[in-house]
Each structure stands twice: as structure tokens, then as C-alpha cells.
Image (tube, rainbow, N blue to C red):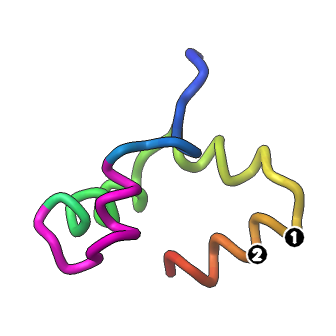
């Protein structure tokens, strides 16, 4: 599988800037099924994973 750039995703930045924006909402929906995002999350250390889980769920 190709390396994903989820940590620097421009759609993720849109969500961070305005979670209610159209692109922000698409990104959030996308994270529910995206294999790249799931791989990114599982590759992180536990502390960072928990921090992101609290922020985006």
C-alpha cells in the first residue's frame, strides 16, 4: 500500500479550521472508512492516537 499523507492532509486542515464546512464534513465522513486513515492512526504512538481519537470522534 502506498504511503499516505494523512498527517498533512489539506482536507483535514479544512476540518480543523472549520468543522462545519462542506469539505470538512466530507473529510470527517471519509475517515470512517478510509483504509489510509486507519493505517495512519494505528501507526501512531498510543498517546498521539488517543489525542486524535478525542479530537476527531
Residue shown at 88% from the left, 56% from the top: 45
Answer few, some or many: residues within 10 Å of disc 1's Cα (few below 14, many 20 plus, some between 14 and 19).
Answer: few
Spatial CA distance of label 2 from label 1 is: 5 Å
Residue 40 in the figure: left or right of residue 55: right
Q: Magenta includes 20?
A: yes
Residue 30 location, x and y as percent?
Answer: 32, 54
Residue wearing tag 1? 47
Q: Quadrant of residue 51?
A: bottom right
Residue 10 location, x and y as percent?
Answer: 35, 44
Residue shown at 40% from the left, 69% from the top: 16
> On screen, 32 above or below 51?
above
Contact, mark 2 vs mark 1 (Cβ under 8 Å): yes
Q: Quadrant of the N terminus?
A: top right
Viewer-closest of 24 and 41: 24
> On screen, 18 above or below 37?
below
Badge number at residue 33: none
Secondary structure, magenta segment, majority class: helix
Residue wearing tag 2? 50
> On screen, 53 above or below 34?
below
Q: Magenta includes 56?
A: no
Answer few, some or many: residues within 10 Å of disc 2's Cα (few below 14, many 20 plus, some between 14 and 19).
Answer: few
Residue 19 location, x and y as percent?
Answer: 29, 77
Find the magenta span and give its range.
11-22
Amino acid at each position: 500500500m502506498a504511503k499516505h499523507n494523512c498527517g498533512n492532509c489539506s482536507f483535514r486542515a479544512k476540518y480543523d479550521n472549520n468543522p462545519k464546512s462542506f469539505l470538512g464534513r466530507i473529510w470527517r465522513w471519509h475517515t470512517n472508512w478510509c483504509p489510509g486513515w486507519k493505517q495512519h492512526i494505528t501507526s501512531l504512538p498510543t498517546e498521539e492516537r488517543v489525542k486524535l481519537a478525542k479530537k476527531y470522534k
